[in-house]
Amino acid sequence: MTKIESKKVTVPASAADVFNFLSNTNNIERLLPTDKISNWTSDGKACSFKVQNAYQIGLELTENTPNTNVRYKSTAGTPFPFQLNVTLNEVDGKTEAQLLCEAEINMFLEMMVKGPLKNLFDYMADKLTTQFVTA
């Protein structure tokens, strides 16, 4: 099992707000690099997108723990099975968040995708911190 963790970030919002945001898959698109994603679809409970020069990825919500954990799993057609967990911990009205991917990837594919996936999850974590900033 391959594990890939994003950096920990602090989101300027309550854990409830972050949980609600992440519990709607329509919002996942706002965390992805728009120049590297195409064919986006979402129904609020599952989403799908194509990564530039790579694969079609599907995510669906699974068991969540309100205000502490949002879990997604890969859907049929995704090149390898994985789970993506976002842990949330509220501290002084802000939320510490981190993404953890657990994937079943063979060693050859792992060498090719681990670095790009780490970069993607760090990017998503950074984008999460900007979703609750008010003007």
Image: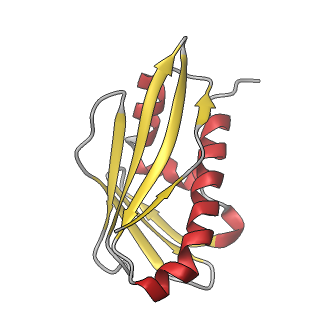
Q: What residue occupies the far left of the structure in this picture?
A: 63
Closest to the observer, 53 or 106: 106
Percent x, y of residue 19: 41, 33
Quarter holding the C terminus? Answer: top right
Q: Relative to 36, does residue 5 appear above or below in the rendering?
A: above
Residue at the image point whose x is 56% and y is 67% from the top: 117
Percent x, y of residue 82: 34, 66
Quarter holding the N terminus? Answer: bottom left
Q: What residue occupies the far right of the structure in this picture?
A: 135
Q: Is residue 37 left or right of residue 24?
A: right
Percent x, y of residue 87: 42, 38
Q: Relative to 50, does residue 42 appear above or below in the rendering?
A: above
Q: Is residue 50 left or right of residue 12?
A: left
Residue at the image point whose x is 46% and y is 78% from the top: 56
Closest to the observer, 68 or 51: 68
Q: Relative to 60, does residue 76 appear above or below in the rendering?
A: below
